[in-house]
Image (cartoon, rainbow, N blue to C red):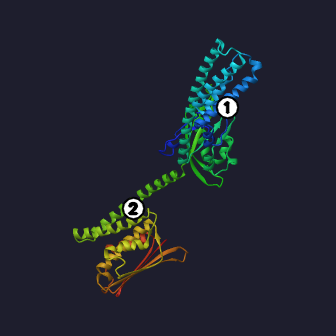
Amino acid sequence: MPSPNALIRVSLHGPEAAVETLFHRCYSGAKPKGLRLLTRFTTLNPVPREVAVLSAFAAVLLAMLVRYVLDPLLGDELPFITLYPAVLVTAILAGGEAGVATLVLGSLATFACLTITQRPAPFGPQTFTGLAIYLFGGGLSIAAAASLRAAAARLEVAQERLVAALEASGAGTWRWDFRANEVDWDMALVRLFNLDAASAPRKRGDFRRYVHPDDQEQINRAMEEAMESGGTADYEFRAVLPDGSQRWMYTRSRLLRDARGGPSLMVGACLDITERKRAQERQALLVQELNHRVKNTLSVVQSLALHTRRGSRDLDTFQEAFESRLMALSATHNILTQELWESASLKDILDAEMIPYGGLDNGRVNVSGEPVRLKPQQALGFGLALHELATNAAKYGALSVPHGRLDISWRAEADASGQTRLAVDWVEQGGPAVEEPKRLGFGSRLIERSIKHELGGLLEMQFLPEGLRCSLSLPL
C-alpha cells in the first residue's frame, strides 16, 4: 500500500469522510519523501524589487554572452534569439516585474550591440521585425510564467491544507504502481503501523504480513471490484503490528487509469479506527446488558408488587410498602448508573439505603469493613436485603427507639473450597425486646430470596432478646 504523490480532499466529518476522495493530480514520476517536501519544491515566493532588477540584469548579461559565443553559428540572423529563455526563466523565478525588466533591458542591450557592430543594420526592417517578434514572444512568455506562478501558489495552499487535514485526522496515504508492482507509503502511514521507514512494504505481497489472515480475502475482493468498476474501494481490516498487537484500520482507495484506459495506479488513505470499533463493541454490549437488566428489574418489580399486595392489609399499606421498596431499588440503580453499571461499592449501597433512617452519620449506626465492590446483580439483591433489614429495624428494632444502636461490619474471607466470600454481620442493640416471629413476613422472605436464591449466598437470622443478629455471606 502506497505514497503521498496523490492529493486527497479531506472532510473532517468522521473516519470515512476524512479520506473520502482521492485525486492524482501532480505525479511526476519521482518519489518524494512526503507532502511537505513536495510543497517546498513547488513554492515560488515573491522577491523584492531590487532582487528582480538584479535578476533582469544578470539574465540579459548571460543571454548576450551566449549570443556572442554562438555568433559564428548564428551570424547576423536572429539577434534576439537568446533573450527568449532569459525572459521566461526570469519571469518564472523572480516574477512578472523581473520578466518585463528583462524584456526591456534585452531590447536595449541588443540595439546597443547592433549599433556598435552594425550587423545587421540597427534600424533596418530586419531588426525591427525581429524586435516585434521578440516583444510579442517575450510578452507571451511573461503571461505564461504568471499563470504558472499562480497555479503553483494555488497548489501550495491546497497542499498545506492537505497536510494540516491529514495531521488532524491521523490518516496516512499510499500509492500502488501496477506496472512496477511497487508500493509506497508516506511516513504518516509508516508510523500508523508502528514501523520504521526501512520496514515499510515495497511490494503488494509485503503488505499482507501486516494484515490479519481472516481479513486478507475481503481486501482482495475490494481491490478486484475497484479494478473492474474503476471506482473506489472501501474496507476495514485488522492490522497486525510488529509487536503482535492488533489495530482496526479503515482504507479508501481509488483506481487511476492510463491514457489507454488500463489500470495504472491505485492511491488511497488509511485511518486508525480502533477506538471507534471498541466504542461500537462497548455500545453493543451495553445495549445487551441494558436489555437483560431491564428485564430483570421488571421481574423484580413485578415480584415486589405481587408479594407486597399479599402482605398488605389495605391499599394505603400496600402503597407505602411498595413505594419504599421501589425507592430502595432506585437508590441502588443510581449508584450503578454512576459507575457505568460495572460495579458498586458496598459502603455506598449501605449509605443510600440508610438515608431514610438518618444515614450513617447520626451516631446510631456504626459501619466497618474493607473496601468491597459488588457486581450489578449482587448490588441489586444486596440492596433490597439491606432495605428490608433497615425497615424492620426502624419499625420494630434498634432504630425504633432513640437509644438503640446498629453495628454493620463486613469482611472478605476464603471458605473451605478457597472461594472468596463476602461476610456481613448486622447486629442490633438497645432496642425493644425481640421475639422470634411465628411466621415470616414478606420482608424476611425477600431477604432470604435475595441472598440465598438470587445470589447463591448463606443467611442466618437470630432473634436474640437484646436485638436481631443477621449474618449473611455471598460469593465474590
Residue 305 drawn at (x, y percent): 30, 65
Which residue carries the number 1 mark?
A: 58
- Residue 467, quarter of the rendered image: bottom left
Q: Amino acid at mark 2?
A: Asn
Q: Who comes first in sequence, dot 1 or dot 2?
A: 1
Asked if one can make out residue 447 in the rendered structure from this viewpoint, the answer is: no
* Label 1 CA crowd tier, 10 Å (few <14, some 14–19, many 20+): some
Left or right? Give the position of 447 relative to 252.
Answer: left
Q: Quadrant of residue 46?
A: top right
Which residue type carries mark 1?
Answer: Ala
**In the image, residue 382 lies at what x, y percent?**
40, 71
Viewer-nearest of labels 1 and 2? 1
Location of residue 204 with respect to 128 vertically, above or below: below
Residue 251 in percent (x, y) is at 56, 43
The quadrant of the picture occupied by the N terminus is top right
Provide the residue designation for mark 2.
296
Residue, far top: 125
Which secondary structure, mark 2?
helix
Mark 1, secondary structure of its residue: helix
Q: Where 85 sits versus 363, above or below?
A: above
